[in-house]
Image (cartoon, helix red, strand yellow):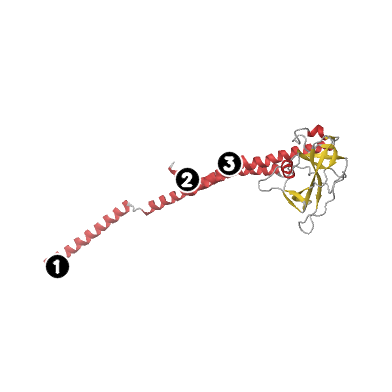
Amino acid sequence: MRRLSFLLRPSWLVLALVVVGFAYACFTVLAPWQLGKNTSTEARNDRIAESVSQDPLPVDDLFGNGGATTDTEWRRVIADGSYLPDSDVLVRLRSTESKPAYEVLTPFVLDDGNTILVDRGYVRPVEGTAVPEILAAPTGPVTLEARIRMSEGTVEGKDPFTDAGYLQVYFIDSGQIAEASGLDLADGYLQLDPEQPGVLEAKALPQLDAGPYLSYGLQWLAFGIMAPLGLAYFVWAEIRERRKAKARNSDEVISSEPKPTSNKATIVRSGSVRSTSTARTTSDKLADRYGGRR
């Protein structure tokens, strides 16, 4: 355990928390988000593809009292009734064919007395963002062919307002528009097909491809796996470097220690040399004194 004690340092603890948090987000938020979008896109494409070969049904048969649902969205319907005059609603900040646009919504009173929003298509702004002149919807009874759409929902702080003589909104949400206009609107709306009474520039159907959501989801899963593996690699590399450093320090200590045998031999030899030198000196002195030296 002492080998791993460095992992308790603040820098390593912060790195571990970041990696764990990132991996958790990949598996629980980011990957499911993209995979969920892929699933919903595929389901939408299937419904659109099926609707192409289906005959349109009366709007009452599909809309009913509960309004638009996931199962009925994009189905083709026939609606009999009349447009409500002078009641157009503009949807701001839209883009079609990579160009800014206003979508035009007009309430439509069905023959059974219910009122539903009809998306008549879009118009281009003029002089920057100014509202252009909008062709009024026809008066009197008409029959429309359209597709059922669900309300988009809203975001807090994006409230409807009146400008240039029109009620303007940021979302196609029947509940919000009903509250702002005072009309009793059915939940959802109808997207008008081309060449229908009151249509402006009809909105094109979405492209029937799944998009990049599946690959994005798989990438986030891969990132979630790679992050802990990367942390494990850094821990292993740190342990390896510490082992190498410890081995180098041990070799340096061993090489710097004195050799006992060699030193002892040197001491013995030095002692014998000193003893021999001392003996010769004494002998020479005695010979000089007593005449024993030749």
* Secondary structure at numbered mark 1: helix
Q: Which of 211 and 151 is in front in this view?
A: 151
Q: How far apart are marks 3 and 1 (CA)?
A: 102 Å
Q: Residue 288 carries which label?
A: 1
Tell me what residue is drawn at x 51 percent, y 45 percent.
235
Pointers 3 and 2 in contact (C-beta within 8 Å): no
- x then y, percent, for residue 33: 66, 41
Q: Nearer the viewer, residue 255 or 285?
A: 255
Q: Residue 128 carries which label?
A: none
* Among the two numbered marks 3 and 2 on one chain, the one whose residue lies closer to the N terminus: 2
Label 3 sits on what residue type? Answer: Tyr
Q: Mark 2 points at which residue?
A: 7
Q: Mark 3 points at which residue?
A: 24
Pointers 3 and 1 in contact (C-beta within 8 Å): no
Res 266 visible = yes
* Among the two numbered marks 2 and 1 on one chain, the one whose residue lies closer to the N terminus: 2
* Secondary structure at numbered mark 2: helix
Label 1 sits on what residue type? Answer: Asp
Q: Nearer the viewer, residue 120 or 184?
A: 184
Q: In this view, does 145 lie to the left or right of 168?
A: right
- x then y, percent, for residue 280: 20, 62
10 Å neighbourhood of mark 3: few (<14), some, or many (≥20)?
Answer: some
- x then y, percent, for residue 120: 82, 45
Give the total of numbered labels: 3
Label 2 sits on what residue type? Answer: Leu
